[in-house]
Amino acid sequence: MKYIWIASCLWLMTCSMQSFAQPPQLQAGGKIQRIDHDGQDAPQVFDAERWTIVALIQRRGVTVQWACEPFRLVSDPSAAVDAQLSIEITKSNRGTRWVESIPQARTDFRMGNLEALVMVESDDAGVAQAGLTVTFLGDEIPLLMAGEYETTVIGTITEN
């Protein structure tokens, strides 16, 4: 009878530990960003957006990706302007190595590249903050149509 009781306790302990397992989390730190074009023939850079990465029990680490498509003119979605993403780890806990494996990427609408994707990876459980910068590459278009352009950045986190 003693062995059965021990086995039951181990099973209960395993179940309770699994029920507290937390999936990794990716938290955007801000709100929708807007800028007005400054009239200069130069890329228009949005302020860096802070994202918090929380992977408390993922001992093999996590991979985080952010992606977007070109900016589209709201009144005429066939008009597109390329977008660029840049990512940088700005803060992290000690003991976990974070790497910007794809630190910068851009779309190229004319060449058919409709996705910019940047990525960071960790080698262990940990917490980090990343700064994501979005750039509107309207300076590459000879005649930029007036109006409001938009794109959406989507962040995903997966366990390694």
Image: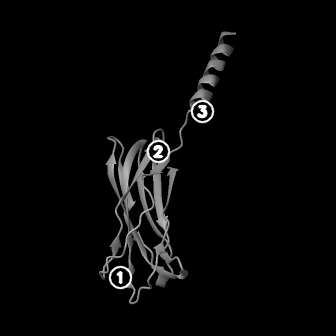
Residues 117 and 80: in front is 80
Q: What is the quadrant of residue 116 in the picture? A: bottom left
Q: Is residue 43 above or below residue 53?
A: below
Residue at mark 1:
139
Q: For mark 2, give the secondary structure.
A: loop
**Label 2 is placed on what type of residue?**
Arg
Q: Position of residue 23 (x, y in %)?
A: 54, 43
* Residue wearing tag 3: 19
- Mark 2 Cα-neighbour bin, 10 Å: few <14, some 14–19, many ≥20: few
Amino acid residing under circle 3: Ser
Tell me which amino acid carries mark 1: Asp
Along the line of sight, the residue nearer the viewer: 17 or 47: 47
Disc with the residue nearer the chain's start (2 vs 3): 3
Given this view, does label 1 or label 2 mark the residue nearer the observer? 1
| Residue picked out by circle 2 | 60
Q: Select label 2 or label 3 by which is in front.
A: 3
The first of marks 3 and 1 along the sequence is 3
Q: Residue at x 59, y 24 (%)?
A: 13
| Quadrant of the image containing the N terminus | top right
Q: Secondary structure at mark 1?
A: helix
Which is nearer the eye, 71 or 17?
71
Task: Estimate the x, y position of residue 26 in percent, counting from the top left.
Answer: 47, 50
The image position of residue 66, as x and y in percent, is: 46, 61
Q: Confirm or deny contact between disc 2 and disc 3 (CB under 8 A).
A: no
- Which residue extends farthest bottom? 142
Display coloring: one colour
Residue 87 x/y as whole percent: 37, 61
Marked residue nearer the N-terminal end (1 or 2): 2
Marks 3 & 1, CB-CB < 8 Å contact? no
Q: Residue at x 46, y 76 (%)?
A: 148
> Can you tell which quarter of the image residue 96 is in?
top left
